[in-house]
Image (cartoon, rainbow, N blue to C red):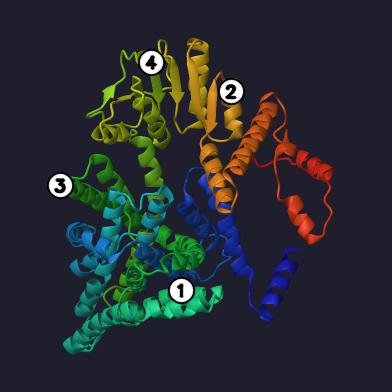
Amino acid sequence: MAVEVVGHAAEAASHGIDLVPVVVLLAAGVIAVPLFKRLGLGSVLGYLAAGLLLGPSGLGLIHDPESVLAAAELGVVMFLFIIGLEMEPAKLWALRKQIFGLGVIQVAVCGALLTGAGVLLGFSPVVAFIFGMGFVLTSTAIVMQILGERGELSTDSGQRMVSILLLEDLAIVPLLAIIAILAPTGEDGGLWARLTSIAIALGAVALLIFLGRRIMNPLFALLAASKLREVMTAAALLVVLGAALLFQVSGLSMAMGAFLAGVLLSTSAFRNQLEADVEPFRGILLGLFFLAVGMSLDLSVVAGHWVTIAMSVVAYMLIKAGAIYVIARLLKSKHAEALERAVLMSQGGEFAFVLYTTAATAGLIDGPTNAIFTATVIVSMVITPFAIIALGYLTPKPKPSMEGVEKVSGLDARILLIGFGRFGQIASQPLLAMHHTVSIIDNDTDMIRVAAQLGFKIYYGDGTRLDILRAAGAGTADVVMICIDNRESAIRIAELLRDEFPLVKVMARAFDRGHAIKLVNSGVEYQIREVFESSLAFGRAAIRILGATDEEVDNVMEGVRQRDRQRFDLQQAGGPAMAGRHLLLSNAEDQARESGVDIDPEAIEETVSKTTHPVEPA
C-alpha cells in the first residue's frame, strides 16, 4: 500500500508541481512547533528538530536541503526589513555608539580569541582565522526570534543585542574582502578588481538611499490610490526583495539591504501597511529557514569527525560566551543581562555559511574542512535553545530592587488601596480630594519608585498574603479597595478579607461579568467592571452626537443600567451564563427587518442556550 502511495505521488509529480516536499515541510512546522512550545522548548528548537528528522540524516524526505536553505534565507531578509521599519533614522543614530562601539569591540575580541583557539586545535593561522571569524557572526534569525517571542526587542538589553547583530551583519562585507585578499594568486583580478568591488558596494548603498528618499514614498502613494490590496502587497515584496537583490549582486548582505530599506521607510505613512503585508511571508520563510538548518546537519560528517566537531563546539561556544560576558561587564552591564547576552549570542550563525563557502571557492579551505566548519556552526545553533532553557533553570529569578522602597508595616489609615496601576491611580483621586487618609500597597518596585517621583507614598507588599494585609491595616480600615490587574489574586484577597476581617467593606475592580460575579460571591460589597463606565460614557456621547436631547439621553442610559443590573442579579443568583439574554438589546431584528427576513426570538434564545462555549459579555 505504501509503495502504491509513493508511486501515485511520483506520478503526480511527473505531471505537474511536486507538492510532496511542500506538504511535508508545512506539516512538520504545524506539528513540531506547537508540540515543542507546549513542552517549554521553544519554536526554534521545534523547527530544527523537525528539519533534522526530514533531512538526509533523518527520514530523507527532503534530499536537497541546500536549495531549501537558499530560498528560506528570504525569511531572515524579511525579518531584518521589519526590524528596519521599527528603526527610524534618529533611533538608529542614537544607537551608533552601541553599533560601532560595543559591536566592533565584541567582534574584534571574539574573533581574535577564536582564531587563537583554532590554531590550538591544529588549524593553520589562515584557516583558523576563517573558522573563528565565521563563528563570531551570531545567528540573527535565532536571536531575533527568541527576543521577539519574549517581547524584548524594544528593551534596552534587546536593543544592545540588535545593535551588535547589525554590526556583525555589516562585518560580512570586510570579511569577504579579506577572503579575496587572502585567496591564492590568480583567483581574483588583483587590486583593481578589489577596489572596483568596493566602489560597487558603496554605489549600491547610495542608490538604495536615493530610491528610499525620493522614489518609494511617491510610488506607494500612487499604488495606494488604486485601492488594490494585492498591488500593495506585491509592491512591499518588491521593495524587500529588490533591496536584497541589489545588495547581493553588489557583494553585500541581502539582509542588510532589506534592513536599510526598512530604515528608509520607517518614517513613511505606509510603514504599518508594509509591515502587515510582509509579516505573513516573514513568519513562514523564517520557519522554513530553521527547518533548512536542521536538514543541513549531516550526521555522517558529525560521526566521521565527531571529536574535532565536539571540541570545536565546546571550545568556541565557551570562549565566545566568556568574552561576551566579560565585555558586557566591563561596559557596565548588569550580571543577569551580561549572562543572558553571552548565552544567546554564543553560537555561530547563518552568515558563517556564506563565509565558509566563499573561502572554499577561493581555495583557502577544502571541502571536508568546509563541512566540519559548517557542522560545527549548525550544532552550536541547535544547542543554543537548550542552553537558554538551562540558563532559566540554573539562574535564580531576579529579585526586585528594594532601593528607595519601604515595606509595609503598622499602617492604620481609614482606606487601604491595593494596587496602584492605572485603575488605582484614578480611583485614589476623589478620596485624596476629600482629604481622606489612604494607605497604598503594591508589589511592583519600579512603579513604586516612579510614583514617589510624583509625590505618592506607596508601600511594598503582596496583598494575597494575610500577614501583609494585617501590616497594612486591613483589620482597622473602613474600606479596602482591590485595584490590582490579576483576576485570581483579586479573588484571593477578597476571600482573605471576608474570612479574616468580616467587618471591613470591600470594593474591587473586575475584568468582566464572570469575574464580577466571582468577586461578589467572595464577599465584595461593591465591584465595577473596568470598562463598564467608560463604555457607557462612550455610548452616551454617541447618541448625543446623533441628536438625542438631554432628557432622552438620561432615560436611555438609565434603562441600559437597569437592564444590566437585572441581568447581573439573575446570573449572580446561580443562573446560566446566558441568563437574562432577553434583557440585552440586539441589532439582529433590525438587520432582519431590513433584509425582509422574519426572526423568531424564541429560536434565537434556544440556539444561544445550547452554545457550548458562549462568549462572555463584559
Query: Crowdedness of circle 3 by 10 Å Cα count: few (<14), some, many (20+)?
Result: few
* Residue on which the image places disc 1: 236
Disc 1 or 2, which lies upstream in sequence? 1
Residue type beneath disc 1: Ala
* Residue on which the image places disc 3: 330
Secondary structure beneath disc 4?
loop
- How far is mark 2 from mark 4, CA to CA? 22 Å
In which image quadrant can residue 114 be found?
Answer: bottom left
**Residue toward you, 233 or 504:** 504
Residue type beneath disc 4: Arg
Q: Which mark is residue 520?
A: 2
Whether residues under marks 2 and 4 lie with C-beta atoms below 8 angstroms apart, the answer is no
Residue type beneath disc 3: Leu
Mark 1 or 3, closer to the camera: 1
Residue shown at 75%/41% (left/top)?
611
**Residue toward you, 23 or 83:** 83
Side (left or right) of 10 relative to 96? right
- Can residue 107 be seen by looking at this rendering? no
Give the position of the C terminus as an image quadrant.
top right
